[in-house]
Amino acid sequence: MEHIKDLIPFTNGQFYFKLAFGMVCAFLLTFYTIPAIIKISRRKNLMDEPGVRSSHLRKIPNLGGIAIFYSIGVCASIFAFELFELYKFLFASLVILLYIGVMDDIVIMRAYKKLLAQLIVTALMVIGSDVRIRSFFGLFGVYELNYFLSCGISIFTFIVLINAFNLIDGIDGLAGGYSILCSAMFGISYFRLGEYNYPLVILSGVIIASVSGFLYYNLSNYRNLKIFMGDTGSMILGFLLAFTAICFIDIFIDKNLPDVPRYHLKSAPAIAMAILILPITDTLNVFLVRVCSGKSPFLADRNHIHHSLLDLGLTHRRSTVYILVYYLFIVSVAYFLRHIDVNLLLSVIMLLGFAGAYLPKALLLMKNRTI
């Protein structure tokens, strides 16, 4: 990234203090905010009603994303304020997504209004804050991208990941657990890439802590403590993961940054794809199934990976664990094969991703035939 070198490097003491204190504060803010949100949601009947596609049988509060936004917004702007100085529209984008998410969770907005808001948010980040994919590193034979193509691809990437992350939020713990794993992997990568990236490490840590506080309630067995993150939480987390992924790819463009390991430079896009492979393959799989069935690709159904696992008789928690373990396996494969050609690596990643999407469907088909 051409301007990340303008950050003032932290001392080790400053970094570890900010990371530890930021994570503690983020966890506590979420943990102690959610009970108030649950209380207000029940009093005002701001609940998620069970439907045909729902995996729950009773009304559950679905405004947990407000607590996640509150925690991340406060703690990141204090402990990683450098990011908000560099990316002027980052906080504004989060506020817009908060508004759109809350409106959709309460009154259900029309799809085109949500898409318009997402276009505004991503344009602010890509054009206003210059958060762009500048090179494909030889992926599909493409290297440096011109400005307009870079902006177009980056805006598309943001929107796809925001909506794809929203689609995997279908069972307890999946979206939250996956965002923790993604943030942890990006955070570790940023840490290894040098002190100039420490604000991004802190942001990743704050996301992990905030979502951990939410998962305490989301995975609760007690009815009065249960809450969903809703579109508010899934859109904000999808946006932040897209932001960290693009920053991760873009870091390798700036050859003037010190201490950036070059040994896996060409595989950066494929590694980022591997970390975000679950929402990408799940969304592509669902769209393909709908199109092949002659249905609209935007028509809601029960063709997601987690739906197949639930239909096999697994609980929410077991389904979540199996999905997360499998996609950790994909990231491990991508890491150990990072030295191979980037196009071959991406092919392996996508093959494994689609295998994970279709395996539960195949098992469900076999189960139905034996009945």
Image (tube, rainbow, N blue to C red):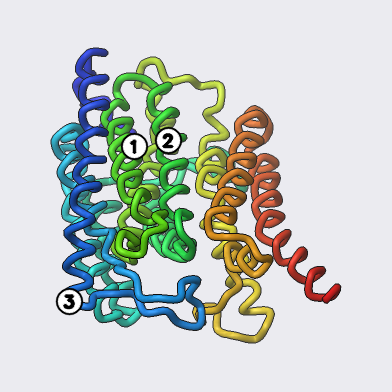
Residue at left offset 33%, top offset 79%: 112
Q: Is residue 139 above or below residue 265?
A: below
The 10 Å Cα crowd at callout 1, few under 14, some 14 to 19, many 20 or more, is: many
The 10 Å Cα crowd at callout 3, few under 14, some 14 to 19, many 20 or more, is: few
Q: Amino acid at mark 3?
A: Lys
Which residue is at the front of the view, 6 or 272?
A: 272
Q: Position of residue 349 (x, y in %)?
A: 65, 45
Assign a secondary structure to mark 1. Answer: helix
Q: Is residue 13 above or below residue 170?
A: above
Assign a secondary structure to mark 2. Answer: helix
**Label 3, label 2: how many angstroms apart (C-alpha)?**
36 Å
Describe residue 302's horizontal placement relative to residue 101 as left or right: right
Q: Amino acid at mark 1?
A: Ser
For residue 134, what is the image quadrant?
top left
- Give the quarter of the figure containing the N terminus: top left
Precedes in sequence: disc 1 or disc 3:
3
**Label 1, label 3: how many angstroms apart (C-alpha)?**
34 Å
Which residue is at the front of the view, 226 or 156?
A: 226
Residue at left offset 31%, top offset 39%: 209
Describe residue 324's horizontal placement relative to residue 350 as left or right: left
The label shown at residue 265 is none
Q: Is residue 193 above or below residue 102?
A: above
The label shown at residue 204 is 1
State the residue position of label 2: 184
Residue at left offset 21%, top offset 51%: 128
Callouts 3 and 2 close, C-beta under 8 Å: no
Q: Position of residue 331 (x, y in %)?
A: 59, 38
Callouts 2 and 1 close, C-beta under 8 Å: yes
Residue at left offset 52%, top offset 29%: 265
Precedes in sequence: disc 2 or disc 1:
2
Q: Amino acid at mark 2?
A: Ala
State the residue position of label 3: 44
